[in-house]
Image (cartoon, helix red, strand yellow):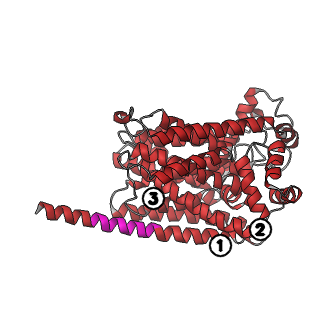
Amino acid sequence: MKRTLRLARWAAQEISAKRARAGEAILLGFSFLAALAVCCRIPYSDGDDAFFLRTVAAHPHFADFVAHLTRTMNGRVAASAALFAVFSENLWLWRIANAAILLLFLLLSRRLACLIAGQKTAPSPLPQLTVCAALAVTGVSVVGYAMLWITGSVNYLWAGAAGLLALYAPARSLFCPKDPAPAALAVLGIPAGCFACLAQEQIAAVVLAFLVLAAAGHPFPGKSTARRKLPVFLWVQLAATLAAFALFLILTLRGERTAGEVAKWLPEWSAMPLSQHIFLSVQWLAHGYANHLRYLLVLLWALLLWRFAAQKKAIPAGLCGLFSLAGLLPVFRLSVLTDVGLRGLDMTKKVLRAPVFADLSLMQTAVLGFWLAAILATPVLLALALRGERARRPLVLLFLAGLASAALMFLSPTIYASGSRTLFAATALLIILTACLTVSLPKRGHILLGAAGLGSLAVLQLLENYPFILSAFAK
């Protein structure tokens, strides 16, 4: 009798898993077709795309093109190689490749989220739906400039997908040690990590940080695994990735770009005191999260609110509710809590005078303080909500790594000119974090309610930005 019950339970689990995989496959297929349809509408832009078209025409040989960009711009050798392929061939190459890489990004985000939650596969399509919906609620300018702009997608989306691929095998060896990744994926992660480090410095910093933590035997899942012997491929991958990042730094420091960028975008950058550099970074961070990642944070806070309500913790639940309401105010055309002092700054032109703290009004100072408090309180709320769970430490680290990746703009004179695409690494980590929180949602009713909430947020994002989207597609 017991054997029959075990077989019945196993059969039910298999049927449930097959349904979840079928639902994910349908969702991913729809996502690929939607991404391809959008990419098919995108032509070369008048800015950097036109510049790279001229550069390819002037330097038609691959080695000459890469050497020229390395000498005059930065050490993004891998991105330069991909740009040569994109701009020397038919535009359809980028359209198909970008849609496929976006699909890979969505799939890897869900798989990493499930691994962190302690499951090799998702128990339902909700985590994959969360990944897709979280991307849909991300600021249009982040998605547009980092994933759908030809030059931006190569530097951010392609590098980000390579970074996630590089982290998959190490994550599987840490969180599912009895079922490691196939050898092919482990080997493929080595060149993927090198590509990420030679394509985009923010993504490189995130990949390196987590590889170092993994190689050091950091006890992500629990103290009992702190001294687990890690596979040889991880040490090889870490060495190769460190070498690639060192090469990137050497090539960038030898380049001619920095002085020209300072003069072109922010002339007083080199002469500013340290305190003003810190203020610019903090203000930019608050501006980015308040304006471009607002709904993604609302999604995260709503999931935490759900957990705190189940745990009957009134104060943290109230904070999550307050932050969520503040993030939803722009839906009602109340944008008072999104102005941290950068609203009137034209980031597409040279900034002759950088903002200073004294320029802020009393309201702008209060808004800046509110968003800093909300951002800094979030990892604390995460730790409280996940107390006693194996995902607690890695999820807090994911959030902090996203903050750190955005704060790296402290080192760049193009802090404003680079725009919201520099929030891509933070966006990717937040997407994985929110998807991980949905893996263990109990009961079918909760899953349906969660899916309805995700869909509602995506619709709100679409309604708020539809004029921008229509104008983009009208070109």
The quarter of the picture where the N terminus appears is bottom left
Look at 48% across and 48% down and name the residue there. 169
- Give the quadrant of residue 40: bottom right
How far is disc 2 from disc 3 in space, using C-alphas? 33 Å
- Give the quadrant of residue 341: top right
Q: Nearer the viewer, residue 275 or 394?
A: 394
Sort mark 3 into few (<14), some (14-19) or many (20+) by Cα contacts within 10 Å. Answer: many
Q: Nearer the viewer, residue 17 or 216?
A: 216
Disc 1 residue type (three-letter) = Ala
In the rendered structure, the answer to whether residue 382 lies left or right of residue 311 reads: right
* Residue at image mark 3: 127
Q: Is residue 18 magenta?
A: yes
x and y percent of residue 214 in the render?
48, 38
x and y percent of residue 228 in the render?
38, 35
Q: Nearer the viewer, residue 72 or 333?
A: 72
In the rendered structure, the answer to whether residue 76 lies left or right of residue 396 reads: right
* Residue at image mark 2: 43
